[in-house]
Image: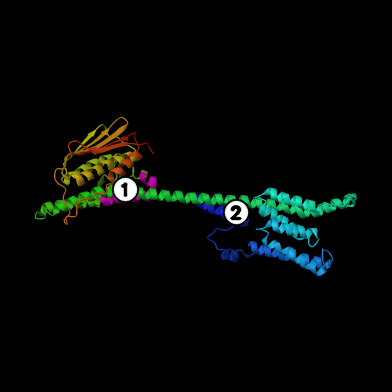
Amino acid sequence: MSSSSHNQHFRRSVRSWLVVPESPRMSASDRSRRFPLRSPAVVDVVITVAVLGLSVWNSVKNPYLGPAAPWANLLLAALGALPLLVRRRLPEVTLAVALVAKAFQVSSFVQPFAYYAEGAYRGPHSRRTAWATAGAGLLLVIPWKAEAWTHPRMLAGGFLVNFVLAVLVPLLLGLYVGERRAVLAGLVERAERAEREQRLLAEAARAEERQRIAGEMHDVVSHQVSLIVVHANALATVAHDPKVTAEAAQIIQTAGRQALTELREMLGLLKGGPETADADGGGAGAGAGTTDGDGDAAATPATAAVSRVAALADSSRAAGLPVTLHSEGEPRPLAEPVERAAYRVVQEALTNVHKHAPGAATDVRVAYGSGTLSVSVTNGPAGRPAEAAPDGAGPLLPSGGHGLIGLAERVRLAGGDIESGPRPDGGFRVHATLPAPPRTAG
């Protein structure tokens, strides 16, 4: 069970155990229709009607029990129960009316409910106030006449009924319920806060994933599409030669298939996660070194990401870019992030040469050290001017200006360093150093 579903189950369990405020998204009418008998207003009306009935019945049975005429005592007994309607919002007012009714012997039925309300709705916020009201109730039941103290048994019985049962027990019960409600409400709030934090983390993860997908799309598509555009532009000048046109069309077809293959591979990694990447022999590095007749990638050894540099050099050379490739040291299997980063360094650098320095002599070097892998792409000044679009709006290969920034981030995540910048002769150099421990088995 996920963290979010666990939090939702916990909140439902707490709300089913004790009535707590529902979510703001549920209106008051919806709550009353769903739980009509658990509505606070309904409970208060029921209690008020019950106490009012008992007070009126007691006043009818004892018409002279009160400070005024029978009809006035009956009216006071009825009015004394009405403050119970606001006992949740004004517990002190309800208790004050109950104590006055008790003192004038108008009604004694309001007092227990008033003390319960004081403990349940005021106690969690101010215990001192709740216990101060208990002291007021104690002063009310203490006999002020000396002869009352001469009958200890009667005094103890009156104390038990008028204070312990009518004051202390309801107050303690209200304090318990109020504290319990406050604790459970705090737990619900913590669960909701945890759910909100989980939702924010999920949103941040989605934003990071979108950014990663955008980087992958740039790396995968940019190089192959650049080659396709270069060869498609060349078709306009060799349209009279069927043989050369067929060769250029074949190159465009191969580059397009490679782009589709790498896109499928990337989407498969994004859907399948790390397990899929491991099963495929190292993610984007493995499984795309060569293609069969259908354009699907054939599985290659673990060093596929670095060995594919030769294929990048060949495709750029076929597009008219003089590229030389040098390899130093003994190739060995590397971790997938390192292989992928090394491949993307060469791919992005060659793409930039096609865009900004077409025809420039380019040198690609891959050097295996004892614990590092160095990849560098160095090009001289442009061998020919950049070609403009047919409508004269700009170059055929526009640049978004974010390739090197994303490349630096990729190399950094792989644990390496990258340097890039212009050279004194007018060329450009990209050099990356990556950690190169052997790929761990399993």
Amino acid type assigned to the residue bearing label 1 in the image = Glu
Question: Which residue bears the numbered disc 2?
Answer: 14
Residues rendered magenta in the picture? 259-277
The residue at the far bottom in this view is 71
Which of marks 2 and 1 precedes in the sequence?
Answer: 2
- Element type at mark 1: helix
How many numbered dots are placed on residues in this image? 2
Amino acid type assigned to the residue bearing label 2 in the image = Val
Residue at 62 percent of width and 51 percent of height: 182
Report the magenta stretch's main SS.
helix
Q: Is residue 154 visible?
A: yes
Picture layout, residue 146 above or below residue 24: above
Picture layout, residue 260 above or below residue 33: above
**Is 175 placed left or right of 405 in the picture?**
right
The residue at the far left in this view is 240
Q: CA distance from mark 1 to mark 2?
A: 45 Å
Q: Is residue 278 magenta?
A: no
Question: Which residue bears the numbered disc 1?
Answer: 216
